[in-house]
Structures are given as structure tokens and as C-alpha cells.
Amino acid sequence: MPVFDGHNDVLLRLMRGKIQPEKAFLEGDNIGHLDWPRMKQGGMFGGFFAVYVPSEEMGVDVDSLMARAEYDVPLPPVLDIAPSQRVTVHMSSLLIRIERASNGEVKICRSASDIRHCLDNGKLAAILHIEGAEGIDPDFHMLDVLYESGLRSIGPVWSRPNIFGHGVPFRYPSTPDTGPGLTELGFELVKACNRLKIMIDLSHLNEKGFWDVAKLTDSPLVATHSNAYEVCPHSRNLTDKQLAAIRESRGMVGVNFATSFIRPDGMRSDDTSLEDMLRHMDHLIEHVGVDGVGFGSDFDGATIPAEIGDARGLPRLVDAMRKHGYDEATLRKLCYENWIDVLERTWGR
Ligand SMILES: [Zn+2]
């Protein structure tokens, strides 16, 4: 079964790695969750490749913090624009260099037909995506340059605050209603994305930010990697009211494999069953519809169930979904068709 996926952090892993990034990705390095050989083994032909500017270490032991029954991970401070732009250019260029070194095997997709072409020809369909727009200046010069480089999707904030808005912290248990939403500049960014037909990713916005985008945007509402709050009451997950708005807009949710957003107890542990993931899928299908759910793995960005392990484990997940009772037509929608369709509705043909 072909799989298209809503979120990965492999570019961050490659930037920090010791092996030359194009080689590590194209030939495979068996580190983390994702490289092109392992993607092919798992049937994964494409997805969103996140450009994310990491913060300096704050001396907070996130692991022991999130091992508690309740937690609220402190967010890093606002980042300066110059270093953020350097990292944004660096990570974007990694994907461009991977495409260039791939002998036509990797394509940075700018349209839904680009993605279908990759699916039909055994190529990797990569979407250049920004998770947290710290590298975008208030006059949107960088936005223009990145758009021409293939950028087609932006999450205005990662959880950390920036000039565009306030994100949702990693808090359990907590609703996503954690603070103020978009700033005035954030509204301008949404309008600029609508003009360019760049997809807006709602996954790291808090609830106010979500509704700010929902009221303004003329595109389908998309959360690339989030789960159902009713199943796991984590601040990063979506309430039924949010899911109803996504459905109304003919939008989409990508099911996140991160165990802290899957497990009802919010714990970060790879000892998490696929049954727990299926509860989210059932809930999301019930509330968003069978055309509005897909995958948003968070590969290379999160602790995922050991049963999946890495990209090679996707067929095990698909098998579990089949045994759970999803028919073949439903599986195709969840595994890749819904993503291609919502991107076509967002980007145009
Ligand atoms: Zn994320």
C-alpha cells in the first residue's frame, strides 16, 4: 500500500548528522526513522518535509518532565530573525540538494499532479514545509523566495511564540485553549499564504490561533500531525469542535504517531499499542469523515510505537487497520488519496 505522510523531521536529523546529508538520505543511514531506502521498503512514497529552527537547549530535562503523570513543558523564548533565516535557508537547501543528487528519483512537488506523477513512477514526492515561520520576515521577502524554491506549506508557529502568533505548549492534561492566538502579522501571513495558495498547517497553533485561521482563510483547514483530544487529552490534540470545523471546510487531519499524543495517559513510551492509534483513527473518521483523515507520522521528530519502529513498519500499521475492519477503498484514502485530494483543493490543479 502506498503511503503519503503529513509530517517528518528528517531534514533536522540530517542537518545535525555526521554523514553528508544527501548521501545519508538517498543511500540510507539507518539512523532514526526515515531515509529513502527505508521509505521504499515501507511503501512510503512521499510526505511533508519540515524546515524547523531548533532552539538552544534550555537545560530542561524534557524526558523526566514528560515521565510525570501531569506535565507542562516550558516553551523556549522567541528566536531572532537572522539566525533563524540562516537555518531556514540551510534546511531548505538540504531538500533541494537531495532532489538534485537523486537522478530524478526525488521531486519537490509544487502541485497535486506532481505528487500523482511520483506515485505512478516510483519517485519520492517531497513537500517543502515550514514548521514555525521564524525564518519569514515581516515584509514576506523570504516567503517569496521560498515559494519560488518550492515551499507549499507553512505552520505559522511551532509551539514556541513568534511574531506571527502563540503556539500550543506540550501540556498534559490540557485542552488546546492555552493562550492568545495570531498576532496582526499572523493574520497578514495567512492572507499572503492564501494569495500564493500555500497550505496553512494548524497543528501547533493553540485553539485561539486555530479559530483565527479558520475565520480568515479561504482554504481547507488542515492539521498535518495532530490527534483527537477526546481520546488523549493533550494540548496538542484537537477537540471535537475543531474537528467539526475541519470537516465543514473539507479539510484534513494527519494522525500523529507520537506516543504522547496517542496514549490516553499522555506518556512518552514506545511501548504503545497500535490499538491505541486505531482509537484515534476511528474517532477522527467519525468526526471529520473518511475523506478527512490520513497519516502525520512525525518520523524523526517523536517517540513512536515500537511496533512501527521506523518507515519500514508502515505495512504493519496498514495490516492492523485492515484487521480492524477498514476496507481497501478506505485504506487507500487514509494512506494517500486524501492527502493528494486536500492538496489539490488547497493549491489548485
Ligand atoms: Zn510538530
Image (tube, helix red, strand yellow):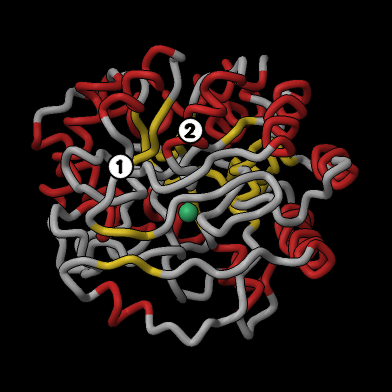
The reply, left or right, for residue 180 in relation to residue 2 is right
Of the two numbered discs 2 and 1 on the same chain, state the one appearing first in sequence: 2
Q: Quadrant of residue 336?
A: top left
Distance, label 2 to label 1, CA atoms, is 14 Å
Residue found at x 46% / y 14% = 249
Instruction: Please say if 283 is above or below 248.
Output: below
**What amino acid is found at the position of numbered circle 1 in the picture?**
Asn
Numbered label tally: 2
Residue found at x 10% / y 47% = 275
The label number, if any, that marks residue 49 in the structure image: none
The reply, left or right, for residue 261 in relation to residue 110 is left
**What amino acid is found at the position of numbered circle 2 in the picture?**
Phe
Q: Quadrant of residue 269?
A: bottom left
Instruction: Please say if 250 is above or below 101.
Output: above
Foreground pick, 94 / 192: 192
Q: Is mark 2 within 8 Å of ligand 1?
A: no
Circle 1 residues within 10 Å: few <14, some 14–19, many ≥20? many
Q: Farthest residue toward the front?
A: 180
Residue found at x 75% / y 60% = 88
Quadrant of the snapshot with the C terminus: top right
Instruction: Give the residue number, with chain letter if any, for mark 2.
Output: 210
Instruction: Give the residue number, with chain letter if any, for mark 1.
Output: 227
